Amino acid sequence: MKSGAWAAESYNRPVIDLFAAEDTKADRAYINIRTAAREGSSRARAHCEELWRDFAPYASKQFIAEFPYHLHQRWHEMYLAVSLLHAGLDIQCPAEGAPDVRVQYCDGRVLWIEAIAPTGGEESNPDRVVYPRQEPGDPPVAYSVPTDQVTMRVSGALRDKAAKLKTYRDEGVIAPDDQAIVAINVHDIPHGFYDAERYAFAATYGVGPQYVVLDRDSGAAVESGFQHRPQIQRSSGAPVDLAPFLHADFAHVAGALVSAADAANYPTPLGLDFMLLPNPNALPAYTASQLPIGREWRLAPAAGDGYNIVEIIEHQARR
């Protein structure tokens, strides 16, 4: 499946044990999966090793060195690459100085994917996202989900990687006719994994809260939809753009590929959870079904301003 010079360095390297490192300073998730003391962690290790059998020829030395210390971030890259492989795509994984995955199409087109798996943010970040503090034995409590803060974390990840893709284009790594997208895994953002679609739409197209209009007399619903919210504010008052895909200055990014899976919670078949949100202003634009995993939305210009969803393409069925 592998071709070209991008992967030549790693292609002939002997496959090593993905869980060989015994460092006590490693990521807690890595240590738990490595020791496999429980059924869930044992299943996660088997899953990682199964992915690794397919991904090992593509992995850089940097990936192997970082896996014990950034397990979820590196797992996301591996899961993405193997999902694309299983979909029959020709991929390469440059070692450094380029996006994480390069997809080569038989018609000569090239699509680059830059992956990121953001967290809730550093402690110094006033807009960081955390779960409510609760001690063992405390009774369950209701709390408000900080949806704006979660959306900002997704939006920030998209913008960070979009800036990196711009640098790759300026440096000539990504050719003018190549496409490029950002793959965002929201699992490590508290509250993000159970409503990934909501946050994906909020951070790309500015889709806001759902609303319903009721008739005063009958009480019947006469209209419903979603508010357009192109901007929110940080706690500092600084604005955050939530509709980058509706702006021309984001044309170098063809779309966002969003996932909420992790090493212990993943779908069958691989890639079923991915959501492709295209950028309608991208140049060159993403064309339907280029990445035949998960599902993707197709947009068309609305009668006035903005865009309408005209189709949702389901590439895979759950087994």
Image: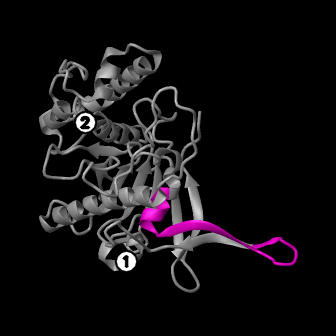
* Residue in the image at 37% along x and 77% along y: 247
Q: Amino acid at mark 2?
A: His
**Image marks 2 and 1: residues in contact by CB distance under 8 Å:** no
**Residue 221 on image: x %, y %:** 78, 70
* Residue in the image at 14% along x and 38% along y: 8
Q: Specify the quadrant of the image occupied by residue 83.
A: top left
Q: Specify the quadrant of the image occupied by residue 313.
A: bottom right
Location of the C terminus (image quadrant): top right
Give the magenta-colored segment's residue range.
Answer: 199-222
N-term-proximal mark, 2 vs 1: 2
Few, some or many C-alpha atoms within 10 Å of disc 1 (few <14, some 14-19, many ≥20)? some
Q: Which residue is mark 1?
A: 247
Q: Amino acid at mark 1?
A: His
Q: Which residue is mark 2?
A: 70
Q: State yes or no: residue 210 in magenta.
A: yes
* Residue in the image at 23% along x and 61% along y: 165
* Residue in the image at 42% along x and 65% along y: 204
Q: Secondary structure at mark 1?
A: loop
Q: Nearer the viewer, residue 251 or 210?
A: 210
